[in-house]
Amino acid sequence: MSAQAAPSTCDLAIVGGGIVGLAVARELTRRRPDLSLCVLEREAQVGTHQTGHNSGVVHAGIYYTPGSLKARLCVQGARELYAYCAERGLPHERCGKVIVATDPSELGRLDELERRGQANQVAGLRRLDAEGIRELEPHAVGIAGLHSPATGIADFPAVARAYAQDVLDSGAAVVTACAVHGVQARPRAVVLEHARGATEAAHAIFCAGAWADRLAVLAGADPDPRIVPFRGAYLRLAPARRHLVRTLIYPVPDPSLPFLGVHLTKHIDGDVLIGPTALLAGARDAYELRRVRPRDLLDTLAWPGSWRMFARFWRTGLDELRHAALRAAFVRAAARYVPELTVADVEPAFAGVRAQAVARDGRLVDDFVFSSTDRALHVRNAPSPAATSSLAIARHVVDRAVESFGL
Ligand SMILES: Cc1cc2nc3c(=O)[nH]c(=O)nc-3n(C[C@H](O)[C@H](O)[C@H](O)COP(=O)(O)OP(=O)(O)OC[C@H]3O[C@@H](n4cnc5c(N)ncnc54)[C@H](O)[C@@H]3O)c2cc1C
């Protein structure tokens, strides 16, 4: 993909070339091929941030509150994503996943997951006993489980690149190395000031992931919710130990948190990942543990919601700190359901940074959030499973754009 020039004017500008922004751009080019459109991406490549640093799991829709946007858009989005990958020859595998309960105290929560999965119409969901878990995952141990054959894996950066290619093929522009730093709402346009000059767009859609709140505020939106970055580090199994995991093994998650717990997942490149941790990060791009950006840290600490969140989750925070600091503690968490796993079996892999919206009242915002300002729409919270759901999110956002921009 060669670098393109930023247009000085266009009908629609999409800010952010992650999987969500590119899916939105692609959907717009299909529905309204007559409009001029550009994607403005800060980095030199598309899909650099969350899209390029995650578990790579195509979620089936089990966890999410029935009726929520996550539930609806994940189930639809996964179906469409598999079809897209098949059509475009992109690597993917519907390998299935097992959620394992290891303690009787988790059985009520496993029941609730089964109920949610059924309500969300997740295909093929099935309860397992201890023997059933072993049949699917011979090295996993639990007292009960859930099998989701519709869960799988995909190469999300490759999907993002394919969306970008679709956008380019339609004649629209994907402009990289083009950080937007100013947003001016005018009566008949939005002016986006960026690293390559300025683009005057009739309308804009902001899909900026970890920087979503900043761009929304520049465009005149409420600062609530704020993005608080959580670093998620992974280990990988040494190649000789990959046989310990056939597909995807997940714990029963803590229902008060929007994270799914330390899981063992086959990755599309053959690795088996263990992770991620969930540690409050000092930067919105804290791929290295020590990276701290004063503005990011200040934004987290100056937000009243952060302190309310600390007060509520300090115990979980200490556990996460232990997992991040002590590899043995992290491995022990995963060894609860794969007991043969030892610290000698693992090596460090990569880290991602979750863009988690935190409300002023300290709530970790669970569902996807979309909002609007004059001539603009904003994707304010698109955490997991937004990569899985990207095509369905795009349809939802473009439906809103058609209505509110009068397209
Ligand atoms: C550790 C981890 C594990 C995850 N696991 C899964 C999983 O297994 N399955 C799943 O479905 N989802 C998973 N997710 C979630 C998924 O990765 C994200 O929901 C998804 O990638 C969000 O896409 P996005 O386009 O909104 O964000 P991003 O990919 O972060 O893209 C946002 C883009 O906006 C650009 N941008 C920001 N500010 C500006 C600016 N000022 N000007 C121009 N461009 C700008 C950024 O450079 C970036 O490219 C995981 C996430 C993490 C962090």
Image (tube, rainbow, N blue to C red):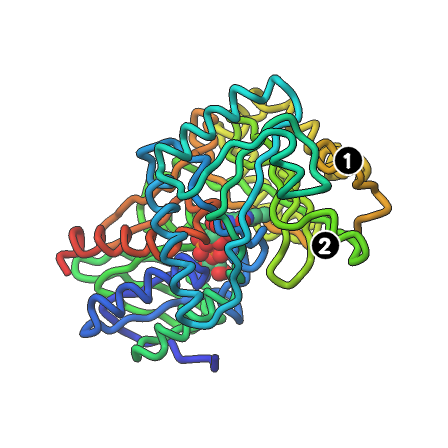
Q: CA distance from mark 2 to mark 1?
A: 21 Å
Residue 290 as seen in the image, left or right of residue 146: right
- Residue 395: percent from the left, percent from the top? 28, 55
Q: Nearer the viewer, residue 124 or 229?
A: 124
Ligand 1 closer than 8 Å to label 2 CB: no
Q: From this viewpoint, which residue is outermost toward the top?
A: 105
Above or below, 17 relative to 336:
below
Image quadrant containing the C terminus: bottom left
Which mark is nearer the camera, 2 or 1? Answer: 1
Residue 292 as seen in the image, left or right of residue 407: right
Residue on which disc 2 sits: 349
> Mark 2: which amino acid?
Ala
The residue drawn where x is 35% and y is 32% is 119
Residue 384 as seen in the image, left or right of residue 190: right
Q: Quadrant of residue 338?
A: top right
Number of other residues with Cα within 10 Å of mark 2, as a class: few under 14, some 14 to 19, many 20 or more: some
- How many dots with numbers? 2
Q: Nearer the viewer, residue 302 or 137?
A: 137
Can the viewer see residue 279 in this picture?
A: no
Above or below, 282 relative to 267:
above
The residue drawn where x is 70% and y is 27% is 318
- Residue 387: percent from the left, percent from the top? 46, 53
SS of the residue under disc 2: strand
Q: Quadrant of residue 172?
A: bottom left
- Residue 371: percent from the left, percent from the top? 29, 44
Residue on which disc 1 sits: 339
Q: Nearer the viewer, residue 385 or 94?
A: 94
Can the viewer see residue 283 in this picture?
A: yes
The residue drawn where x is 35% and y is 39% is 121
